[in-house]
Amino acid sequence: MDWGTELWDQCDIIDKHTQSGLDLVEKYVKFVKERTEIEQNYAKQLRNLTKKYSPKRGSKEEQECRFSNHQAFLDILNEMNDYAGQRELIAENMMINICIELTKYLQELKQERKMHLSEAKKAQQSLEGTYKQLDNSKKRFEREWREAEKAAQYAEKTDQDLNATKADVEKAKQQAHMRTHIAEECKNDYAAQLQKYNKEQNQFYFTDMPLTFNRLQDMDERRSKKLAQGYILFADTERHVMPIIGKCLEGITRAGTNVNERNDSMILIEQHKSGFERPGDLEFEDYSQGINRASSDSSLGTPKGPLELLGKNKNKTFRLFNKKSKSVDTEGFTHLPPEQRRKRLQQKIDDMSKELQKEMDQSEALGKMKDVYEKNPQMGDPASLAPQITQTAQNMERLRGELNKYESWLTEAGGRGDSIRYSTHSLNNNGAHNPNSPGALSDDADPSQAIYTEFDDDFEEEELAAPIGQCTALYNFPGSSEGTISMQEGEVLSVVEEDKGDGWTRVRRNNGDEGYIPTSYATITLNK
């Protein structure tokens, strides 16, 4: 059994090698899991960072985004948010394609290895059982053959003994013959057991064990190949998102190159210019002509010198760099400089026009709903809509009155030269003002009639809003959800409505199709 001992030593070596390979797979899975945790934490920190420095809606920082350097910083935050999404995608793909897949494969390999070793152990136990039977039959044959020899010697001795009777001799010969027959049977059984053992031993060493070793070898090679694929997949997962990460970095570079310091200065000047007229030159006052004036002249008629005028107006003249007190916002914005007042009034009119358009749309929807209820009473009671219709009508009337009031203030603030520019406003379907429309609102026109002058009774569809810019798609977008539109990388679309802070921009194709796309998936250029 020396050769068998050497065989099992080799089997033990193979078993340890396969176990070491399985341990390596398990170690690699743990490594990838820790890597995914690092990616997830990194992405989470990036998102928290972008959220921390993103301007809150309605805050002063959001209002300053009209400047290119502020907008560039906001673009950088958006790009970093997309970058964080790619890191999350890396972590997700590694977890699904490597960790979960290899863990499942590792369990299958453990079961297969256990099965192969169990079959080898079973073959060994069967061979050992056959060898025990062979050994027992051999020992029995040896024992019975000795007994047969003793019986034969005793029969021969009895036959030569003169004092032995014939019956004794016959009995001894029968006993010797019986023992010989038993020994022959044991010999045949031993020979059969030896043949059986040699056959099983040949099957074990030349068929069963080599087959087990080949299976273990094949299993280990498949394990190595699967592990190598996991190594490659680790790199491919990173490489797959590199183009998008590169575009994020390009977007950050583009944000830096888009900063226009000159344009920012002009925007600041346009935003805060007062519109006040510059003071004229002071006239020369000749005091030498008034030396002989009567002392009874009133001080009100005494001309004031330059120093007195300077002392009177110094707070107004040198107020440029002084900290202004916080002004109180009044309804007509009369406390503001002329230019700022016109801007605030115009903004107020735009907001009220949009609100009025919403009320008009709601009134139209309520009217259609009432008609449906009247034609199909089972769908609802038309009378239940009366309070909403009344409230909507009151809101529309109130907004029209306020709109006329603010337009009159705007006409007053703009002067005669600006009266047409600031007083003629009409509403289109999107609630925007069109200064050149024929149905413009004015002080002497009925606003309720002017609003409907653009609409025909047979015209049902909404007019298409004028594009406010263009965008170029950075990535493919399927547009599978409701309200969205698909686009291909590099496609140029018209921007209809800019991002309101929710991350979506409304665009239109040349064929008239409209829908929303993710703002971060395109480069957007708005018209000045």
Image (cartoon, grey):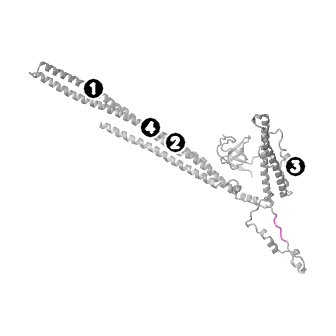
Marked residue nearer the N-terminal end (1 or 2): 2
Q: Label 4 amino acid?
A: Gln
Q: Which residue appears at 48% of the width and 45% of the height? A: 28
Magenta stretch holds residue 172: no
Q: Is residue 417 left or right of residue 218?
A: right
Which circle marks residue 111 in the picture? 4
> The N terminus lies in which quarter of the figure?
top left
Q: Secondary structure at mark 4?
A: helix
Mark 2 surroundings: few (<14), some (14-19) or many (≥20) residues within 10 A: some
Which mark is on residue 445?
A: 3
Which residue position is annotated with label 1? 189
Residues marked 2 and 3 touching at CB (< 8 Å): no
Q: Which label is found at residue 100?
A: 2
Q: Earlier in the sequence, mark 3 or mark 1?
A: 1
Residue 293 placed where, x, y %?
A: 90, 79
Q: Is residue 289 above or below residue 80?
A: below
In primary-sequence order, the first of circles 4 and 2 is 2
Classed neighbour count for the residue bearing mark 3: other residues with Cα under 10 Å, few (<14), some (14–19), many (≥20): few
x, y percent for residue 469:
73, 48
Query: Label 2 vs label 3: CA separation?
Result: 73 Å
Magenta span of residues: 277-282
**Mark 3 or 1: the one toward you:** 3
Query: In the rendering, at what x and y percent does residue 307 appear?
Result: 81, 75
